[in-house]
Amino acid sequence: MRRRNKRMAGLALAVMMAMGSLAACGGQKEAPAPAAPAAADTKADKAEESKTEDTAGEAAGEALELSWYVAEPESHAWSQVSYDIAKEIEEKTNGSLKIKVYPGATLGTQAEALDMLRTGSLAFEVTGPSILASFCDQVQVYSLPYAFDNAKQAYDYFASEGSQKMYNETVLNASGVRTLDVWYYGDRNLTIKGVEPMKPDDLSGLSVRCMDTPIAKTVVAALGGNPVPINMSELYLSLQTGVVVGEENPVPTIIAQKFYEVQDAIVLTKHSVHLGTVEVSEQIWQSLTEEQRQVITDVLAKYRPIIEDRINKETEEGLEFLKEQGMKVIEPDVEAFKANAAKVVEENFGSDPEWAAAIKDLNDFKANWKE
């Protein structure tokens, strides 16, 4: 009983800490919000509600209610599949686990959600792998240009000894966050205006937008362009006014942001197999039974290919839509882009021992990988 009282006191303190952190922060982006109780009218209220859910019923031995955060809007494949996953987990645990999905970043920013995971006041988060970079910078090896040839190779690398040690030893020990799975987000491609590049030299001297991170700058440099950091909220206008002539994103994002209105070509560089991560609070994970954990991992494994199929279908349909909007689809010399990427990555990261070790682990895996 004493041990249980200590545990409940710890959870109460974690909730108070997370509430204080969330109240001081703002939101991330507008998106359709799911139906919610009348009491949860703000992000802070919803966050407080999710914290209550994640500990509700524990004392009475009732069903454990857990919250699931998705940064993408409700219409996105990740969000829609998350609803299916939540329903199936409840069914397969005979109602002992009830998961409520919060899409559209309605609980706050991805960073705020990560803080809640760490305190145990949020159960699950679906986000990008770079959110964990503050605990181990090398998780961003997944985001290097041409890190993977296809999604299957990326899934297999995640399951490898080196990757699991990075995520579920190094990051886990530093953060209290366990990474359960990787989800496919789509291949990133280049869009451009006024030029039809077939190889990196064709982009020499041209300004291409990137996020303001070393990895993102490396990606654009690998494509041959001059990386210019610009916030996504300012990107459309920057493309329209010629501040930059291009940008890179998956096809669904290109459509959602209406970049086809200010770009005239998409170049199928396929320079990044863009992945997201499914994370769980280690505090909550350890409170589950072995049977409950197995159900969760089994259901995630079942839905991973379903997500990939949906993203691929959206991409295929999206390319047809872009053609209808007048964009030219260019198939470049991908091998030339890969060769330039290898050179740029070595120049930027090869002299760092930790990065060199991470890149070697990835390259060794790929050299021996069989589909």
Image (spheres, rainbow, N blue to C red):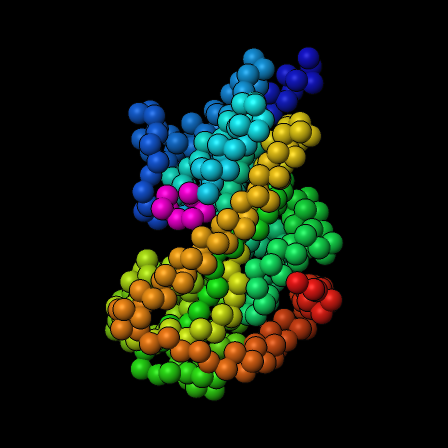
Q: Nearer the viewer, residue 337 or 177?
A: 337
Residue 333 position within the rendered picture, expressed as x and y whole percent measured from the top left: 50, 82
* Quadrant of the image occupied by residue 146: bottom right
Q: Is residue 246 magenta?
A: no
Q: Nearer the viewer, residue 217 or 93?
A: 93
Query: The magenta stretch spans which residues?
Result: 73-80
* Quadrant of the image occupied by residue 195: bottom left
Residue name at image x 48 percent, y 54 percent? 309
Residue 202 position within the rendered picture, expressed as x and y whole percent measured from the top left: 43, 86
Rendered position, 36 above or below 124: above
- Is residue 54 at least partly visible in the picture? no
Q: Quadrant of the C terminus?
A: bottom right
Q: Is residue 74 magenta?
A: yes
Residue 238 position within the rendered picture, expressed as x and y whole percent measured from the top left: 30, 69
221 with respect to 370 (left or right)? left
Residue 130 position within the rendered picture, expressed as x and y whole percent measured from the top left: 54, 55
- Is residue 163 at least partly visible in the picture? yes
Residue name at image x 29 percent, y 62 percent? 258
63 with respect to 285 (left or right)? left
113 with respect to 239 (left or right)? right
252 with respect to 177 (left or right)? left
Q: Nearer the viewer, residue 358 or 26?
A: 358
Residue name at image x 55 percent, y 16 percent? 62
Q: Quadrant of the N terminus?
A: top right
